[in-house]
Amino acid sequence: MKNGLFTDSKESGHSSLHSNVFALYFDLVPRENKRKVINFIISKGFSCGVYTSYFLLKVLCENGCFEEAYRLIVNEGENGWLNMINQGATICFEAWGKEQKWNTSLRHRFVGNMGF
């Protein structure tokens, strides 16, 4: 950890949204650093893909940050579900928008045994 945040690797000095979301998700963040990690995650918003957004929202809600999670869900920026809806989505795209991935699937779904 560097400055209370997780870095991308032992050799890296860079703290990414992903490394901190997953550290919080798997309960690896020491109690004294949780608020710093949560604030970092909130500051980064959806600067991640659609896949990681689930884990981001989950850790925010698990830590009582419901308003912050709601703001992300209804954000009108390029990275959000409203962007998909504005582009005609009736199911979750593979990326936040058609222009973000040249070969994006417009009807992306999980495949495999999800326990259902």
Image (cartoon, grey):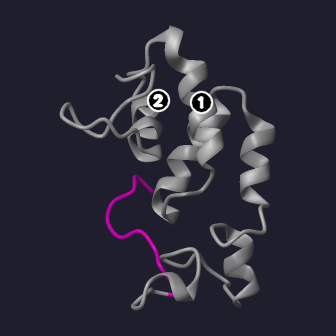
Q: Secondary structure at mark 2?
A: helix
The amino acid sitting under disc 1 is Ile
Residue 43 versus residue 6 in the image, above or below: below
Q: CA distance from mark 1 to mark 2?
A: 8 Å
- Which of 36/111 is in front? 36
In the rendered image, residue 115, in percent from the top left (x then y), is placed at 40, 52
**Residue at x 72% of width, y 32% of height:** 65
**Residue at x 48% of width, y 63% of height:** 49
* Magenta range: 106-116
In the rendered image, residue 110, in percent from the top left (x then y), is placed at 41, 68
**Residue at x 42% of width, y 90% of height:** 102
Along the polypeptide, which appears first: circle 1 or circle 2?
Answer: 2
Which quadrant of the figure has residue 90?
bottom right
The amino acid sitting under disc 2 is Leu
> Can residue 113 be found in the magenta stretch?
yes
Few, some or many residues within 10 Å of mark 1 (<14, 14–19, 20+): some
Which quadrant of the figure has residue 16?
top left
Give the number of the disc on residue 24. 2
> Can residue 109 be found in the magenta stretch?
yes
Location of the N terminus by quadrant is: top left
In the rendered image, residue 50, in percent from the top left (x then y), is placed at 52, 64
- Which of 105/7 is in front? 7
Horizontally, residue 18 falls left or right of residue 42, namely left
In the rendered image, residue 77, in percent from the top left (x then y), is placed at 72, 68
- Which of 1/57 is in front? 1
On the image, numbered disc 1 is attached to which residue? Answer: 38
